[in-house]
């Protein structure tokens, strides 16, 4: 019998009711007046029995029909005054109930006042006070019951409907309760809440807003599997109180799809969550599972460096460059120069920035850092105070095929920018480097290491004669989540296409950092540096790429190696199993920010470095890749090629 009832409730007869259109206001008003009619005649019937109405005052009263019309007219006026009909019945709240209560009290008071006036004028009561006294509470009870009943039935139909998948809510704080209420009150909600999950110490079983609260243990997953529950919404407040990378892994291991709203990195430190933001429910991002606690930087120092200064960002439309531009605006620079070779990305970024920061000044410039004349023109005409050099070629396999271009972009481009910074008295020059510059095994990493050597030795040489020269600072960090060409967008496309997901090697690991996190540390390092330093960032724990791929597949709602296969393709040219942040001979020094350290690297003579760099650049112009790579290895002896045609140079 119970199963037949469930089938009936989930059939087309009832399942569409939660999605039905709202009743027009005039229909709600008509229903309320109809119920008030019932309440009036019920009051008359009670009044005649309890107060012996006929014997006391029948001869002094209007006929019941006239009394009814008067009460109904006053009730209609009260409904209009308090707008009791304007609310949606199935979304009734305390405010709606309060409006009904006030409207009924107003009706009773108006009728009593009318009776007092007529009695003073003629000595007669034209409406029975006893009937009105009974009518007011009865009418309120009936109208209240209507609203509560419709709300209860609507919630029940939503719970029994089959259109939306069931979901548990992880977190019993205000935000979790608000999510449950929002989902239960919406007829077209994407998910149906069926309970809460808590990891608090075991307590007695209890319910919240009509939903059962269950402990986070193995029995929970057995129960969820039994009832076909494959989704969990993590409340924003709960997300802030846990370590997502560890505490949510248990759901991923059980192939439970994790949802949240909004992304916890966007939530303020408060339990009060905006209803509009709660309405955005989506799959949790893999970035959220890899992020560490929010980084705190010394904004006072950064503001001192950037406020009212002209800031130049090369590679401004790239992943790092564009985020640097956005974050710089917090410190009110005088102007921001956007140097970029890619026309369309620069145009899109400029439109975005002018929309987000209407009072800021942006100077978009199409230019190539490899063009020395163009770079000098920009410095000569605009005189930047601070330079963030993010322009570079960064794709390892592609640069293995084009070593000359890697040198021209990463070495010549950096040399041009650095030389012009010195010539036009730039205060600070911050270069964005990479962990691949440490013991490089590929051309991209080696080219960045040569660029590091050039700017560091340039500063040391300048400092000998001019202590107030341009301060050159290098920042070195690992892979950036979500950047152009990074592994996460690549995996997402493969999963969306149904697989397979390709991983180069089962044991390959990488350090990851989010784009905002990296840019925060770049700005902080730019203020800490006194010149010549190479700053390395605390990248946290390395991530196994195979585990990353499996988690991304599970987060998308699939089972790895069953729904989406994983295929190993072998290490790519120049790729190694793990990246290092420091050379084996290098050590680090602490800074005021525990996330930033100074690498103690060996120093080079600028005259020798400059001569070798000029020779390297000259060679790269003549398209002689093996000669170019050989000269790179002479500048960076620790550059040992891996999975590359240039390995033969190491043997020689």
Image: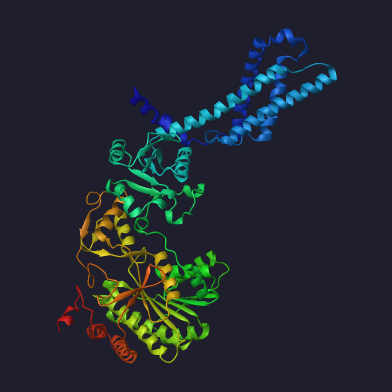
How is the structure coloured here?
rainbow
Q: Nearer the viewer, residue 499 or 192?
A: 192
Q: Is residue 272 above or below residue 337?
A: above
Q: Please state which of residues 264 and 41 is positioned toward the viewer in this rendering.
A: 264
Image position of 163 (left or right of 45)? left
Residue at image position (32%, 57%) is 492
Residue at the spot x=23%, y=70% of the render?
Answer: 575
Residue 179 showing in the rendered view = yes
- Nearer the observer, 527 or 322: 527
Rendered-image quadrant of the C terminus: bottom left
- Of all residues, the one furthest to the right in this rendering is 121
Residue farthest to the left, as pictured: 651
Toward which corner of the image does residue 501 lie, by quadrant?
A: bottom left
From the viewer's perspective, tell me whether residue 595 is left or right of residue 573: right
Residue 29 in picture, x, y percent from top left:
62, 30
Q: Quadrant of residue 537?
A: bottom left
In the picture, the quarter occupied by the N terminus is top left
Q: Position of residue 288 (x, y in %)?
A: 37, 56
Residue 265 image offset from top left, x and y in percent: 43, 56
Q: Position of residue 502 (x, y in %)?
A: 24, 60
Tell which residue pokes out farthest to the top in this image.
55
Q: Is residue 73 visible?
A: no
Instruction: Left or right? Give the position of 216 relative to 339.
Output: left
Number of on-image labels? 0
């Amino acid at each position: 019998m119970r199963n037949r009832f469930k089938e009936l409730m989930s059939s087309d007869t009832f399942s569409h009711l939660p999605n039905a259109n709202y009743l027009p206001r005039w229909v709600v008003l008509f229903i309320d007046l109809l119920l008030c009619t019932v309440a009036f005649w019920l009051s008359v019937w009670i009044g005649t029995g309890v107060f012996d109405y006929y014997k006391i005052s029948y001869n002094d009263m209007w006929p019941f029909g006239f009394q009814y019309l008067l009460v109904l007219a006053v009730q209609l006026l009260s409904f209009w005054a308090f707008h009791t009909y304007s609310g949606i019945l199935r979304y009734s709240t305390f405010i709606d109930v309060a409006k009904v209560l006030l409207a009924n009290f107003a009706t009773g008071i108006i009728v009593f006042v009318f009776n007092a006036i007529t009695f003073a004028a003629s000595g007669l009561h034209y409406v029975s006070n006893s009937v009105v006294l009974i009518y007011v509470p009865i009418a309120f009870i009936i109208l209240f019951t209507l609203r509560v009943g419709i709300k209860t039935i609507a919630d029940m139909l939503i719970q029994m409907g089959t259109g939306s998948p069931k979901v548990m809510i992880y977190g019993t704080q205000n935000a979790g309760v608000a999510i449950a209420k929002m989902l239960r009150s919406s007829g077209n909600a994407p998910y149906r809440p069926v309970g809460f999950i808590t990891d608090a110490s075991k307590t007695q079983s209890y319910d919240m807003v009509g939903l059962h609260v269950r402990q986070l243990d193995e029995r929970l997953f057995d129960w969820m599997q039994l009832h076909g529950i494959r989704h969990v919404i993590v409340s924003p407040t709960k997300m802030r109180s846990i370590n997502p990378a560890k505490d949510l892994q248990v759901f991923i291991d059980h192939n439970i799809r994790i949802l949240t709203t909004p992304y916890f990195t966007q939530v303020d430190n408060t339990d009060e969550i905006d209803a509009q933001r709660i309405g955005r429910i989506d799959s949790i991002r893999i970035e959220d599972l890899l992020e560490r606690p929010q980084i705190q930087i010394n904004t006072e120092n950064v503001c001192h460096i950037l406020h009212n200064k002209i800031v130049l960002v090369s590679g401004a439309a790239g992943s790092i460059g564009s985020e640097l531009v956005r974050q710089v605006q917090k410190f009110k620079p005088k102007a921001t120069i956007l140097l970029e070779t890619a026309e369309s990305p620069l145009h899109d970024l400029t439109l975005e920035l002018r929309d987000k920061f209407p009072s800021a000044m942006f100077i978009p410039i199409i230019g190539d850092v490899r063009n020395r004349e163009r770079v000098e023109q920009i410095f000569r005409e605009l005189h930047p105070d601070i330079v963030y050099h993010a322009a570079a070629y960064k794709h390892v396999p592609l640069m293995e095929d084009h070593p000359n271009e890697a040198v021209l972009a990463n070495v010549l481009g950096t040399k041009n920018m650095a030389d012009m910074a010195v010539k036009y008295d730039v205060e600070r020059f911050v270069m964005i480097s990479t962990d691949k510059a440490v013991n490089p095994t590929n051309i991209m990493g080696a080219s960045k290491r040569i660029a590091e050597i050039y700017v560091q030795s340039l500063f040391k040489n300048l400092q000998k004669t001019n202590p107030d020269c341009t301060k050159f600072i290098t920042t070195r960090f690992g892979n950036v989540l979500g950047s152009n060409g990074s592994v996460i967008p690549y995996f997402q496309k493969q999963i969306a296409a149904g697989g397979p997901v390709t991983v180069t090697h089962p044991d390959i690991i990488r350090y990851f950092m989010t784009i905002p996190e990296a840019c925060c540390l770049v700005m902080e390092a730019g203020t800490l540096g006194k010149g010549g330093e190479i700053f390395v960032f605390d990248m946290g724990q390395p991530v196994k790429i195979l585990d990353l791929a499996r988690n991304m597949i599970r987060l998308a709602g699939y089972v790895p190696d069953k729904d989406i296969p994983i295929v190993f393709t072998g290490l790519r040219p120049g790729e190694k199993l793990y990246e290092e942040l420091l050379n084996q001979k290098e050590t680090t020094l602490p800074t005021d920010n525990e996330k930033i350290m100074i690498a103690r690297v060996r120093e080079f003579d600028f005259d020798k470095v400059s001569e070798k760099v000029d020779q390297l650049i000259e060679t790269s112009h003549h398209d002689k890749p093996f000669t170019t790579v050989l000269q790179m290895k002479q500048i960076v002896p620790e550059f040992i090629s891996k999975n590359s045609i240039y390995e033969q140079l190491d043997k020689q």
